[in-house]
Image: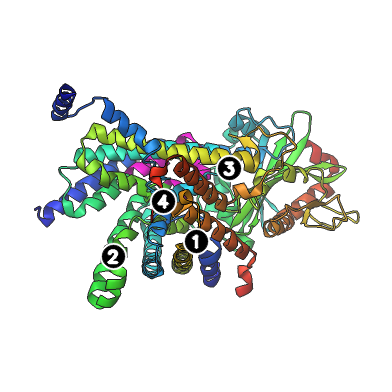
């Protein structure tokens, strides 16, 4: 029979060994994990761009072609990335430091770190919104917006690529979810046909009023800005509809600003 | 998020067994009679209601990046700490019940050691982390998830008691049938998905 | 025959024994059918059923589980003589939790998409009864090499059922295999198959088939 001290010592020793092994492994592999996370996010953003070759090196394509701007809650530009991140490190750092001062444990170290999940910790008027400007090869430019809302079980989020061709229209979307029902709500992510419906939908109606893209179960009267919901996933699809309405709405002042400043500039930014 | 909302969701919609199959081993092993199922169900409510909030405190004030000292990230100890808390809590609860209420101990006692390795207990803590609950909602999540387990195990036990007299192909008898029944119950519970928890607010 | 047993006894004396004879082979093959962890021992249903809607995550889950069962068996078997009896369970849990955490860190670094889709279910390997069940039933009483094989066999037996189930569910639920479309375009995916409940039906049917073919497994109760 062993004494209590011996037993405590045994547990302590074992825990110590395990903790040391784990911390070594964690510290050596965590950078890779964070990088994977970043790549996954960049991939999600790029996958809204029509005709994007997703087999290419996502990191380098993203760094070459995408510039990130930050908007405040009123749609004013807080920061506008003009050069690749490597050439404007100090400017980016100042901008991010300002965001990090808001507290709540939010610490951004790169522009691409800014995400709506962290922003949700702040009051609506203190939130910022990232906008990803994609510069295509033939002067074809897209503005990718981040949107986030509630599905049936939990959060849903996504990216919406907008383009300006005489009028604003959606070029592509990408949705993801935390815990929607497989085969039903989860189809917003898995079903390519559902996502394809959003392509070429307008976000302003004929009178120029903002309508976003609506997801409806039936009675589609305006196919130019309404898409069909997934059957059996009503709540999730209502969530998508609400998310698009509110999410694109956050960027509305910015979009309108671009439109009124100079239509040509939109294409050449 | 509202506490009641989380409670209802955890009990009926995100049911530990019927939606996630957590705690399946004890669910199948202890569901032969309603009486034992009742005891295990109560014990699970008890332990989930205690361990989820405790693990919430540990996760928030010790494990998070920079929670103790700036720059120290201990999330890689999460699983070990959680399971240690669960094992010791189960032990503690067992000792306390034995002292305070021997009659409750007699009905719950034998199930408590089983609970340490019940997936739904650790599952509760892990879901609490991944769904980013607050302290208050983590309490109601723990209790709700426990209630969900309780309902499922008592229901299947009642059905299995009736099944003893049913004519089932020999090869399907017992285990095979229990699985298929659980599947059917899962489908039935899915109809509760239509409940809009916001309506309870 | 007598010579055989004598040799075996001699091999047993030498520690560690790395032989691979008939008994060792049985340790590996038994769990595949007669003593399958899922359909016969009914252990470890918990954490794994929910990940079987697609083949790829199930495959990763199976590999993770094989790793955890075999190495936890190995480690506990090496420690078995020094573990104080009163805290046996805690020590086992510590070792399992450590190994699972290793799996989680490694997956996050090398197989991120699987890490994302498995989420909490990686952590739940800890409470997967099959791991602890084998530690108690085998590793606490056997030498490291044989314990390792036992863990490997049970992990594989578990993984086979998992992947088989995922193949059925993905094929009928999505019309694809590992993400490639294999069903003709005219096939309308059966959404029931992707629902969690379907895995219970399938496992029930697997048990039915297995017991019909192998009547000695039939539950007499």
Helix, strand or loop at mark 3 = helix
* Mark 4 or 3: the one toward you: 3
Helix, strand or loop at mark 4 = loop
Q: Which residue is mark 3?
A: C169
Q: How many marks?
A: 4
Graded by Cα atoms within 10 Å as few (under 14), some (14 to 19) or many (20 or more), the crowding at tag 3 reads many
Q: Which residues are magenta?
A: C97-122
Q: Which residue is mark 2?
A: B110
Helix, strand or loop at mark 1 = loop
The image quadrant that residue C7 belongs to is: top left
Is residue A243 visible to us here? Answer: no
Viewer-closest of B36 and A195: B36
Viewer-closest of C211 and C62: C211
Graded by Cα atoms within 10 Å as few (under 14), some (14 to 19) or many (20 or more), the crowding at tag 4 reads some
The furthest residue to the right: A207
In the depicted structure, whether residue B22 falls above or below residue A165? below
The furthest residue to the top: C3
Q: Position of residue C113 (x, y in %)?
A: 53, 39
Contact between marks 4 and 1 (CB within 8 A): the answer is no
Image side of residue A191 versus residue B86, left or right: right
The CA distance from mark 3 to mark 1 is 29 Å
The image quadrant that residue B46 belongs to is: bottom left
Q: Which residue is mark 4?
A: B65
* Mark 3 or 1: the one toward you: 1
| Dot placed on the residue nearer the N-terminal end, 2 or 4 | 4
Q: Which residue is mark 1?
A: B166
| Dot placed on the residue nearer the N-terminal end, 1 or 2 | 2
Q: Which SS does the magenta portion mostly show?
A: helix
The CA distance from mark 2 to mark 4 is 39 Å
Viewer-closest of A105 and B49: B49
């Amino acid at each position: 029979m062993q004494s209590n001290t011996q037993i405590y010592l045994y547990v302590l020793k074992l825990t110590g060994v395990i903790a040391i092994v784990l911390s070594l492994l964690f510290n050596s592999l965590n950078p890779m994990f964070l990088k994977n996370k970043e790549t996954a996010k960049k991939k999600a953003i790029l996958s809204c761009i029509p005709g994007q070759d997703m087999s290419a090196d996502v990191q380098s394509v993203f760094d070459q072609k995408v510039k990130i701007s930050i908007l405040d809650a009123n749609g004013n530009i807080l920061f506008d990335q003009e050069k690749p991140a490597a050439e404007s490190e100090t400017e980016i750092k100042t901008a991010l430091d300002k965001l990090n001062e808001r507290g709540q444990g939010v610490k951004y170290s790169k522009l691409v770190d800014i995400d709506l999940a962290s922003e949700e910790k702040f009051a609506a008027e203190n939130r910022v919104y990232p906008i990803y400007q994609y510069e295509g090869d033939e002067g074809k430019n897209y503005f990718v917006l981040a949107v986030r809302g509630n599905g049936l079980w939990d959060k849903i989020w996504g990216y919406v690529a907008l383009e300006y061709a005489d009028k604003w229209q959606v070029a592509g979307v990408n949705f993801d979810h935390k815990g929607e029902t497989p085969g039903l709500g989860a189809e917003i992510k898995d079903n390519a046909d559902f996502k394809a419906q959003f392509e070429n939908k307008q976000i302003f109606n004929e009178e120029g009023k903002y309508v976003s893209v609506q997801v409806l179960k039936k009675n589609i009267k305006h196919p130019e800005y309404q898409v069909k919901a997934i059957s059996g996933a009503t709540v999730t699809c209502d969530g998508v509809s609400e998310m698009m309405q509110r999410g694109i709405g956050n960027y509305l002042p910015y979009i309108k600003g671009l439109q009124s400043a100079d239509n040509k500039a939109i294409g050449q930014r | 998020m509202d506490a009641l909302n989380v409670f209802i969701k955890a009990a009926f919609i995100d049911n530990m067994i019927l939606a996630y199959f957590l705690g399946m081993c004890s669910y199948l092993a202890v569901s032969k009679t309603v009486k034992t199922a009742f005891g295990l169900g109560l014990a699970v409510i008890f332990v989930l209601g205690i361990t989820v909030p405790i693990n919430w405190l540990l996760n928030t004030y010790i494990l998070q990046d920079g929670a103790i000292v700036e720059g120290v990230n201990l999330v890689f100890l999460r699983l070990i700490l959680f399971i240690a808390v669960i094992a010791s809590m189960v032990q503690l609860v067992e000792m306390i019940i034995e002292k305070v209420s021997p009659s409750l101990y007699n009905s719950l006692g034998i199930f408590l050691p089983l609970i340490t390795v019940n997936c739904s207990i650790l599952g509760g803590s892990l879901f609490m982390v991944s769904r980013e609950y607050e302290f208050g909602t983590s309490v109601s999540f723990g209790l709700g998830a426990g209630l969900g387990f309780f309902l499922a195990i008592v229901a299947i036990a009642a059905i299995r008691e009736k099944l003893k007299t049913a004519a089932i192909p020999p090869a399907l008898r017992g285990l095979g049938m229990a699985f298929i029944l659980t599947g059917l119950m899962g489908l039935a519970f899915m109809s509760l998905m239509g409940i809009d928890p916001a309506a309870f607010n | 025959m007598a010579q055989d047993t004598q040799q075996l006894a001699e091999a047993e004396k030498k520690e560690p024994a790395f032989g691979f004879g008939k008994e060792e082979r049985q340790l590996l093959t038994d769990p595949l059918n007669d003593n399958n962890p899922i359909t016969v021992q009914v252990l470890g249903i918990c954490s794994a059923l929910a990940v079987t809607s697609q083949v790829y995550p199930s495959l990763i889950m199976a590999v993770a589980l094989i790793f955890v069962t075999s190495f936890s068996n190995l480690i506990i078997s090496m420690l078995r003589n020094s573990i104080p009896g009163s805290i046996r369970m805690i020590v086992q849990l510590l070792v399992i939790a450590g190994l699972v955490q290793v799996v989680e860190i490694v997956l996050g670094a090398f197989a991120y998409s699987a890490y994302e889709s498995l989420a909490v279910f990686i952590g739940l390997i800890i409470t997967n009864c099959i791991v602890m069940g084998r530690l108690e039933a085998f590793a606490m009483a056997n030498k490291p090499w044989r314990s390792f094989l036992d863990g490997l066999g049970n992990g594989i037996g578990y993984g086979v059922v998992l992947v088989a189930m995922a193949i059925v569910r993905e094929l009928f639920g999505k019309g694809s295999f590992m993400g490639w479309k294999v069903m003709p375009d005219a096939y309308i995916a059966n959404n029931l198959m992707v629902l969690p409940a379907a895995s219970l039906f399938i496992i029930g049917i697997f048990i039915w088939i297995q017991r019909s073919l192998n009547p000695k497994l039939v539950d007499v109760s």
